[in-house]
Image (cartoon, helix red, strand yellow):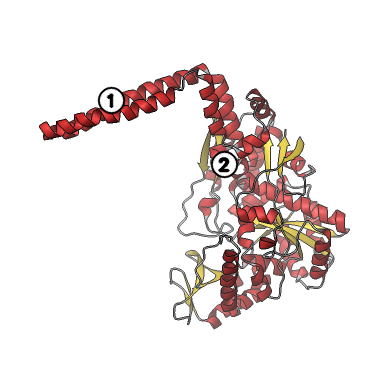
Amino acid sequence: MQISKVHLAGQNNLLNDFVNGKETISSFFGQNPLVKEEMEYRIKNVMERSYNRTGLVKALEEFHNKHEASNESIENVKKLLNKETFVVIGGQQAGLLTGPLYSIHKIISIIQLAKKYEREHNITVIPVFWIAGEDHDIDEINHVHTIENNIVKKQTFYQKTTYAHAASRTEIDKLEMRKWVEKIVKTFEETNYSKELLEELHLIIDKSTTYVDFFAKIIFKLFKYDGLVLIDADDPNVRKLESSLFEEMIQKQDIVRSVFKDTKSKLNKAGYQEALQISEQSIHLFYHSNEGRQLLELSESEEVFQTKNKNYQFSKAELIKIAQEQPELLSNNVVTRPVMQEYLFPTLAFVGGPGEIAYWAELKDIFNVFNLQMPPVFLRHMFTIFERNIVSAMEDFTLNIKDVLQTSIEDMKSEWVKGQVKLDYKAVFSQAKKSLEVLHKPLQDVTTEVTPNLKDFSKKNYVKIEEQILLLERKIDESIEKQHEEQLEKWNRIICSISPNGKPQERVLNIFYYLNKYGFDFVHELCSLEVSWDYEHQIVKI
């Protein structure tokens, strides 16, 4: 396994400016996570704050023991009792089989950044992954994508649920999950690791009750050597620790709404588009009922707080009582979750993806409302994995890595096909179709004039002739594809591996494709590579 890097243009202006450290956007963030002097200031700031380390460790220990975490992870949990222990943190939803590759990339980024800070500052830094267990959009996490015959297929795990329950509260049908996992593994090429892979997944399913259980056990398995600490945001033990801040968030909801609105306005004036489209009446907290999770909003009269569907209404005093006595009925939304995370953990840096960077730009002043500071924000590493057969296929077409990552491979394939044919037959057919339209129009007109009852027939006549032209074009396409079948198969392999469905590899493919091929240690090997710290794209060749 070899690693190198390549410079790719950012996805948008905000991300480009963030990576390049432009003042216009950096002013919306905290310290720079890659500047040693600024991180020393951050360390000092975290040291000056107090945390409920005992309560946090107790909650984490129970979670880690439940999921049979490695000794390395459990030891790291215990280290959090020490006031000179810090964390690097990031999170994601509990996707089935860990979801798209970017979740794995984010965890690797968290682990690598924690190690970097330990080396540079001679301190103890624990990698922490925040599972968004309270997330109720099961449709976002109930599937993976596989590749069959060079076609990308979405494989969804269907399970009936009455309400939009949180992932940590949604039980999985173990029998159906076993069948679904077997279906996924069958799409892979059979290897020396396939049997072990399936057996391990069956074992994990047997020990899992919810989506979060299934996710956590897999992550602990994949990162067993790396001391990764997991937290389920919807853990009732964690909710108890959050009680006082929930209360403060309710008390200060009007200030939060005002500050949030002002920051969005400043961001717009600086030339950036806002990332979060949230009602100005939202108090940025959810209420959990038997119907699932509902966002709380201030009523138009501003006298009560109510769920979006208006089925539940509370006075401020009633909502505060819930925060004090039943905090498990509340959860944060995208705006207040980062604040809660900062409240719970002695955080040196937050690791986020491109989308998170965009919306964190709107949150800095909200931290200040609660006498907290926004942590330094690090854009996670982005990897593309190049297997040996893919590199070999690329060499056949003299394709370089930067081109396949920045340019549409489908377009390159089309250009290659054109190059194999002496005549641009597509242009000839295109002209023929245009000419047919011109030639047939007078025939339709005269038919309508002379025999109006044959108007529809004349149109059908045009369609039939056009269909025959299209058929001939298709037959030529098929003949060319047959002549170059082997080469086109290589093109399709490259596309499915590097740019499946026209998207980056990390947003579609799943880690289990690689685990089946290279074994469970694949992730540890990936995590052990020396990444660059300049926001360049990481290229991994196997």
Mark 2 residue element = loop
Camera-nearest residue between 89 and 354 = 354
Query: Any mark on residue 177, and which?
Result: none
Split into 4 quadrants, where in the image is the N terminus?
top right
Q: Judge the density around disc 1: few (<14), some (14-19), many (≥20) Cα neighbours within 10 Å.
A: some
**Which residue in the protein does label 1 denote?**
465
Query: Residue 355's quadrant in the figure?
Result: bottom right
The amino acid type, in three-letter code, at marker 2 is Lys
Q: Is residue 73 above or below residue 421?
A: below
Q: Residue 409, position in %: x, y?
A: 57, 33
**Which residue in the protein does label 2 denote?**
503
Mark 1 residue element = helix
Q: Is residue 93 visible?
A: no
Q: Residue 31, position in %: x, y?
A: 75, 63
Using residue 39 as the reference point, say whether residue 461 is left or right of it: left
Residue at image x 71%, y 39%? 539
